[in-house]
Amino acid sequence: MPRQLSGNGSDPLERETERERSTPVAARVRRMLEAVAGGALGRRAFGVRFWDGSVLPATEPGPSPTLVVRDPRTLAYLLRAPGQLGLGRAWVSGALEVEGSLEQALALRYDFQGLELSLVDRVRAARCAWRVAGRDALRRPPTVEGEARSRGRRHSPQRDRAAVRHHYDTAVAFYRLVLGPSLVYSCAYFASGEEPLESAQERKLESICRKLSLWPGDRLLDIGCGWGSLILHAVINHGVRAVGVTVSPAQAEVARERIQQFGIADRCEVRVADYRELEGEQFDAIASVGMYEHIGRGQLDAYVRKVRGLLRPGGLFLNQGIARLTPGRAGHDSFIDRFVFPDGELHPVTELLGSVERAGLELRDLESLREHYPLTLRRWLANLAANRAQAIEAAGRHRERIFRLYMTGAAAAFERAELSVFQTLALRPGQRHRLPLTRALLTGPPAQSGAPGHGVLVDGRSPVRAT
């Protein structure tokens, strides 16, 4: 690291900075990149433009994105946290921008997988940063708005509440702009790549209800109910009595407002509660959609055992969640962990299946929806782009940038088969179940498009409406 300046002009680094002051930033950075990591960073499929207007061009042919280093703080973020966390902080703060395809820029990480900087390389990078940006490059940069600082025992109820609220307590106006009127924040189920998002989300809700073989009068539990879309659909279309639980008071408030609007408060309720707090109740069916990603791998067995205890014999449990298809896991200092889903963990689906078996549940159906999630994410990104100004007004510039980055990266990860999403259906043995003999009846004809309340029952009768 550069030593402390003496202040009298005698430090050789200070004299060198004076001599090079007229040299463009790009030229000085280029020499450093060619000297570290065996020159691997000297070959680039991207360009870089610095705050002084100088440009480090791409060295590879073809269309390429340009990283715009708008502020020397970018260097400070990278020196403090090399890799995706430092880049993420610079992006969210606005110190770093991308011209061209953001998705193409994110894919550049594959060009540098396995690249490691030695201690000597890091010292060279720090010296270069000091020379082009002065003390600002070495000072601790400002804390970035929107970054989570988790405290307490990991996956304790208190810490889990804080982690969930960090993401989901954002103004509902922002989520309406991104997700659309359905307010469904999980993978949709498309009949074709051209289908509108709303009808695909309707199809997904109906698919879940069909797989759970819901009958009028059944008691349904939705763990992590969000803004209540699934329980609304199930009560209105299938005549069930539903309970939704969420640890986000903001989500619960919106869900209760929607319940009142549909006039179904006598058969539909939302509680601000952790599923671990539920005691002395049993349900005919339990759904958990997009929630188990917040459960640590070490908690999976306890999670499924709790579900089994809440499920009556013969009842069905459907879990929809994202699973990792590639080895390894995101670190606790990844961009996703610090800015998007604090303490979130993605497991191979086999981890969940093992917990299902150990809990004494019977696996009945497993369906991958991997190709459906990029379609969903790109619809959300299109909504965000079309409503960017309103989204920033609703939730702030930093939140819009966080969502734009994470959803773009996630869409690519699903397309590359790094991630998938599975619907897992399990049965609690002990009583006769209602599952049909053929799987075709689990999915049935697609739900009709439109707002919740326009699905069909599994036997083809008209929708059951609350009176």
Image: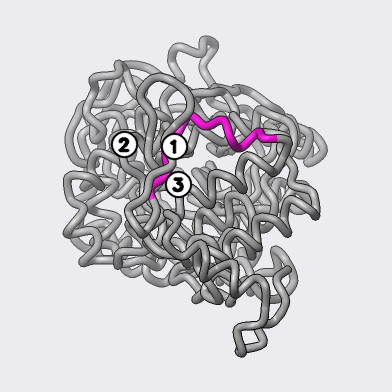
Query: Image quarter for residue 337?
Result: bottom right
- What amino acid does circle 3 point to? Tyr
Q: Is residue 227 above or below residue 142?
A: above
Location of mark 3 (residue): 406
Disc with the residue nearer the chain's start (1 vs 2): 2
351 left or right, relative to 185: right
377 left or right, relative to 350: left
Coloring applied to the structure: one colour
**Disc 1 and disc 2: Cα gap in Å?**
8 Å
In the rendered image, the quadrant that contains the N terminus is bottom right
Disc with the residue nearer the chain's start (3 vs 2): 2
Viewer-proximal residue among 299 and 128: 128
- As helix, strand or loop, the secondary structure at mark 3 comes to helix
Q: Which mark is residue 340?
A: none
What residue is drawn where x is 65% and y is 56%?
125
Q: Which residues are magenta?
A: 39-49
Location of mark 1 (residue): 105
Give yes or no for contact between labels 1 and 2 (Cβ–Cβ under 8 Å).
yes
Location of mark 2 (residue): 100
- What amino acid does circle 1 point to? Ala
Residue 39 position in % (x across, y down): 67, 35
Tag in front: 3 or 1: 1
Q: Dot 3, crowdedness within 10 Å: few (<14), some or many (≥20)?
A: some
What residue is drawn where x is 43% and y is 15%?
441
Q: Dot 1, crowdedness within 10 Å: few (<14), some or many (≥20)?
A: some
Residue 272 position in % (x across, y down): 47, 70
Query: Image quarter for residue 194?
Result: top left
